[in-house]
């Protein structure tokens, strides 16, 4: 549901009474039952070309009932949280558990009934920044973006989402669990598009990557209030820049491009449900096979990748996944060797492989599936200047603007918004339309430099799609700048 009223305040519905009613509604004569309530409230503000677009407020609440019994599994989702509505959902889920008994690949329920809480760390409550102040900030950024007649389109936007979840579980022998999590998300963004003749160039504020958990402090964390002038001037700069050169050379990827590289060529290939074939008809499979874990050299010895939902303020931090498994930091790739996959408790049971707590659902009307959460490349020991100084011929690429990767997440081609030519260890100028291509299982072995913690940036991707029916969800990624050698680079035509 939505409401266009400015400044609409919608209080969360999750409280003690709903927990008690959910617990009373769940049956005690089945192997395992759960009720997961999701209550979401969001505000969307956009100023485009110095004009405020309609303010959009959104709220959405519902519950997913899941029942495991006798080797079957049934789901039923409803927005009717009355006692009668809950009873109908329980009856429907029980029916489908009976229908699917004996027909499931696996119907092993989550292993535990966990109790706990999680809260996004908030330093400055969003509502302490009045609506008028939020709009004036956007108008200010819009004025700074539209500084030249060659900038033909520009916008600044802010989105705030509060999502509260409650997971109540119950078992046949009287076991029960209760997990309450409260998330606060902020998504700032801006864009400037410049045009001259047939040449059109766009620069963005991190291509939606500068988002995270928290309150109004998220804006300062990513420098939102100071970025508009740079974004606009770089869009103009690209109009006169030469096209990116083509050839095999070194590249240095900025953190806001690294997150896409991590997401597409490490994150998705390591999802266990994809490896098991569940996603084949829609999102594809993976070049990774179960026998690779523990031995496969995924990248050079400089590559260390962690799954870490405990990073404060990162987009996909949480205390528990949506099946109730406690979230802990795990090393997926160590010194380039593949150690562990991205699969929740059910996928771990099916595959016999170690996984992580990443069984996640996009909303109350979707069941949890294996999803990336915070997937990070750990910092190295080089400074960015040292990495630039080590490159005789290459391109420093910033901010993804398009991507293409095959259905096994192996062969890929990525394009970036902004490039800087490097010659003999120095940046010598800007280039437009930079792009590169490669093969995942080879590309990461060409990782020859990883910058230290000074360039390590915690970001996210707010709109990763997966699953049938589709689920759009946020994933967190963090990385320093990274150098890759012997990469095929090209410049797209203007």
Image (tube, grey):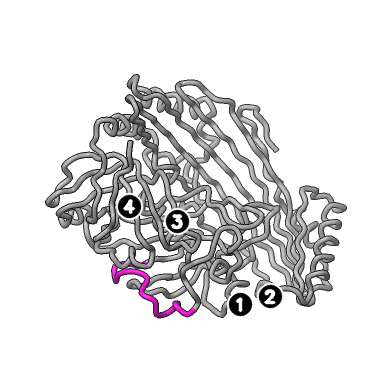
Whether residue 20 appears in magenta in the rendering, the answer is: no
Q: Earlier in the sequence, mark 3 or mark 2?
A: 2
Q: Farthest residue in the left direction?
A: 424
Q: Earlier in the sequence, mark 1 or mark 4?
A: 1
Disc 1 element: helix
Q: Which residue is mark 3?
A: 405
Disc 4 element: strand
- Cβ atoms under marks 4 and 3 closer than 8 Å: no
Question: Which residue occupies 33% across, 48% down?
Answer: 435
- Cβ atoms under marks 2 and 1 closer than 8 Å: yes
Does 274 appear above or below 468? below
Q: Quadrant of the C terminus?
A: top left
Q: Alpha-carbon distance for marks 4 and 2?
A: 41 Å
Q: Give how far across and how far down residue 365 sits, in percent.
A: 70, 53
Q: Alpha-carbon distance for marks 4 and 3?
A: 12 Å
Q: Which residue is mark 4?
A: 436
Question: Which residue occupies 35% across, 33% down?
Answer: 201
* Range shown magenta: 291-304
- Cβ atoms under marks 3 and 2 closer than 8 Å: no
Q: Earlier in the sequence, mark 1 or mark 3?
A: 1
| Label of residue 349 in the image | 1
Between 432 and 371, the residue placed more toward the observer is 432
Q: Earlier in the sequence, mark 2 or mark 1?
A: 2
Q: Quadrant of residue 493?
A: top left
């Amino acid at each position: 549901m939505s409401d266009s009223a400015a400044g609409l305040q919608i209080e969360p519905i999750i409280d003690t009474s709903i927990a008690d009613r959910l617990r009373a509604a769940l049956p005690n004569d089945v192997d395992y039952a759960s009720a997961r309530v999701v209550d979401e409230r969001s505000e969307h503000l956009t100023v485009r070309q110095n004009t405020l677009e309609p303010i959009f407020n959104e709220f959405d609440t519902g519950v997913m009932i899941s029942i495991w019994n006798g080797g079957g599994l049934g789901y039923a989702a409803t927005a009717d949280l009355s006692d009668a509505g809950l009873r109908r959902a329980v009856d429907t889920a029980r029916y489908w558990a009976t229908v699917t008994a004996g027909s499931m690949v696996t119907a092993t329920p989550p292993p535990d009934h966990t109790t706990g809480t999680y809260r996004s760390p908030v330093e400055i409550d969003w509502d302490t920044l009045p609506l008028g102040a939020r709009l004036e900030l956007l108008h200010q950024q819009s004025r700074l973006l539209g500084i030249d007649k060659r900038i033909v389109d520009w916008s600044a936007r802010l989105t705030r989402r509060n999502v509260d979840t409650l997971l109540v579980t119950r078992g046949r022998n009287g076991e029960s669990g209760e997990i309450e999590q409260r998330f606060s998300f902020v998504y700032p963004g801006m864009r400037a598009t410049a045009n001259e003749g047939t040449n059109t160039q766009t620069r963005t504020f991190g291509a939606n990557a500068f988002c995270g958990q928290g309150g109004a402090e998220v804006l300062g964390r990513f420098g939102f209030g100071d970025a508009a002038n740079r974004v606009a001037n770089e869009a103009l700069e690209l109009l006169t820049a030469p096209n990116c050169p083509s050839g095999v050379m070194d590249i240095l990827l900025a953190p806001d491009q690294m997150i896409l590289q991590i997401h597409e060529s490490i994150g998705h290939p390591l999802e266990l449900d994809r490896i098991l074939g569940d996603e084949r008809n829609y999102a594809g499979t993976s070049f990774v096979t179960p026998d690779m874990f523990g031995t496969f050299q995924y990248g050079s010895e400089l590559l260390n990748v962690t799954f870490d939902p405990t990073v404060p303020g990162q987009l996909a931090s949480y205390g528990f996944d949506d099946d109730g498994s406690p979230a802990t930091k795990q090393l997926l790739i160590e010194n380039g060797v593949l150690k562990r996959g991205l699969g929740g408790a059910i996928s771990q049971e099916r595959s016999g492989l170690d996984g992580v707590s990443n069984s996640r659902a996009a909303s109350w009307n979707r069941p949890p599936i294996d999803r990336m959460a915070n997937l990070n490349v750990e910092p190295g020991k080089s400074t960015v200047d040292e990495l630039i100084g080590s490159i005789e011929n290459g391109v420093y690429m910033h901010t993804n603007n398009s991507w293409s990767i095959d259905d096994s997440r192996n062969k890929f081609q990525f394009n970036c918004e902004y490039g800087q030519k490097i010659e003999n260890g120095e940046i010598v100028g800007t280039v437009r339309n930079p792009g590169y291509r490669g093969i995942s299982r080879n590309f990461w072995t060409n990782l020859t430099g990883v910058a230290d913690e000074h360039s390590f940036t915690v970001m996210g991707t707010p709109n990763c799609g997966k699953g049938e029916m589709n689920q759009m969800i946020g994933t967190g990624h963090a990385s320093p700048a990274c150098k890759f050698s012997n990469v095929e680079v090209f410049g797209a035509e203007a």
